[in-house]
């Protein structure tokens, strides 16, 4: 092979063998934890502790017993349903607050506008361990501890600032002339937002909703602190509680964890084009 041909093979860039090789290795490394969780969750415990470890699942050892056992013996289905309700409602509420807040910061001029934007951004810098006690005291006064709605309110306040800053870039990128044309045609300010601006913000709205859904679905510390009843536990808290004091059924834990990742994975796969559009267009200002 000539020197020019060798340089073409080893050149790093889209479409080259090196690029596809590196991409393949990256995908394998990222997908392996998901595969190992599935492989560990659908085998008998004796297979899990075999040495050397069996990386490939054999049909002779594949079984649904760990998954069926954990659903039969524990309220995993209920925990998944609780997580679904909390994630959908809190993410939807965060989107509504994000749209209204982003529109106000982008379109209206008022005193303290810059300070308001800075304070909203500042809330994202506070660690959860710093505010968990004040949140617990507030929800106790409101009688919302050990309640799904208290957890929804908590997650909504965490996700709304991100939604405001994410969607503000979309509103900034939409020409004001489009709304002005709608106002001339008889739309109110709210009507122009609903009929003209909001449809153009769909990628950002979807991306914000998915971010809020994933953040609420996997959150553990606040859910553990605010929920006492096992029937109200989320999937993250319930699966962590499957670990016994004297014995740990790792195949059951892995099976439940694998099932709990499927809603998030399905949502991401269905909406990935909106996520890409939201993350790229949301950072551009027209």
Image (spheres, helix red, strand yellow):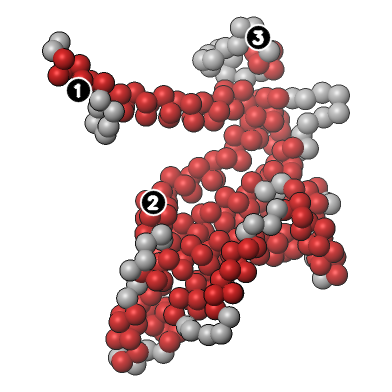
Separation of disc 1 and disc 2 at Cα? 30 Å
Mark closer to the chain start, 1 or 3: 1
Quarter location, residue 257: top right
> Is residue 69 in sight in this rendering?
yes
Q: Position of residue 114 (x, y in %)?
A: 54, 75
Please tell me which residue lies in front, 284 or 180: 284
Separation of disc 1 and disc 3 at Cα? 45 Å
Please tell me which residue lies in front, 249 or 173: 173
Separation of disc 3 and disc 2 at Cα? 42 Å
Mark 1 highlights which residue?
8
Mark closer to the chain start, 3 or 2: 3
Dot 3 crowding, Cα within 10 Å, few <14, some 14–19, many 20+? few
Q: Taking 263 as reference, is 49 left or right?
A: right
* Disc sitting over residue 276 in the figure: 2
Please give the name of the residue rendered at 34% of the width and 92% of the height, measured from the top-left corner. Answer: 186
Q: Position of residue 165 (x, y in %)?
A: 51, 65
Mark closer to the chain start, 1 or 2: 1
Please give the name of the residue rendered at 46% of the width and 57% of the height, measured from the top-left corner. Answer: 207
């Amino acid at each position: 092979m000539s020197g020019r041909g060798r340089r073409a093979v080893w050149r790093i860039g889209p479409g080259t063998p090196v690029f596809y090789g590196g991409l393949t290795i990256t995908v394998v490394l990222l997908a392996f934890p998901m595969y190992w969780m599935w492989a560990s969750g659908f085998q008998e415990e004796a297979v899990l502790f075999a040495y050397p470890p069996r990386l490939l699942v054999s049909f002779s050892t594949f079984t649904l017993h760990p998954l069926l056992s954990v659903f039969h013996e524990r309220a995993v289905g209920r925990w998944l349903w609780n997580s679904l309700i909390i994630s959908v409602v809190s993410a939807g509420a965060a989107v509504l607050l994000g749209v209204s807040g982003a529109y106000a910061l982008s379109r209206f001029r008022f005193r303290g506008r810059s300070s308001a934007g800075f304070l909203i951004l500042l809330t994202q810098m506070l660690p959860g361990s710093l505010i968990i006690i004040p949140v617990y005291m507030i929800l106790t006064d409101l009688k919302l501890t050990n309640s799904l709605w208290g957890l929804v309110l908590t997650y909504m306040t965490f996700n709304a600032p991100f939604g405001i800053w994410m969607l503000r870039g979309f509103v900034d990128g939409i020409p004001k002339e489009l709304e002005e044309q709608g106002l001339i045609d008889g739309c109110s300010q709210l009507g122009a937002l609903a009929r003209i601006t909001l449809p153009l913000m769909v990628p950002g709205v979807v991306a914000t909703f998915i971010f809020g859904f994933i953040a609420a679905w996997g959150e553990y510390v606040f859910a553990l602190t605010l929920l006492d009843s096992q029937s109200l536990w989320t999937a993250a808290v319930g699966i962590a509680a499957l670990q016994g004091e004297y014995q740990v059924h790792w195949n059951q834990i892995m099976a439940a964890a694998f099932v709990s990742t499927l809603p998030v994975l399905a949502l991401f796969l269905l909406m990935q084009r909106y996520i890409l559009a939201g993350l790229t267009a949301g950072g551009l200002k027209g």
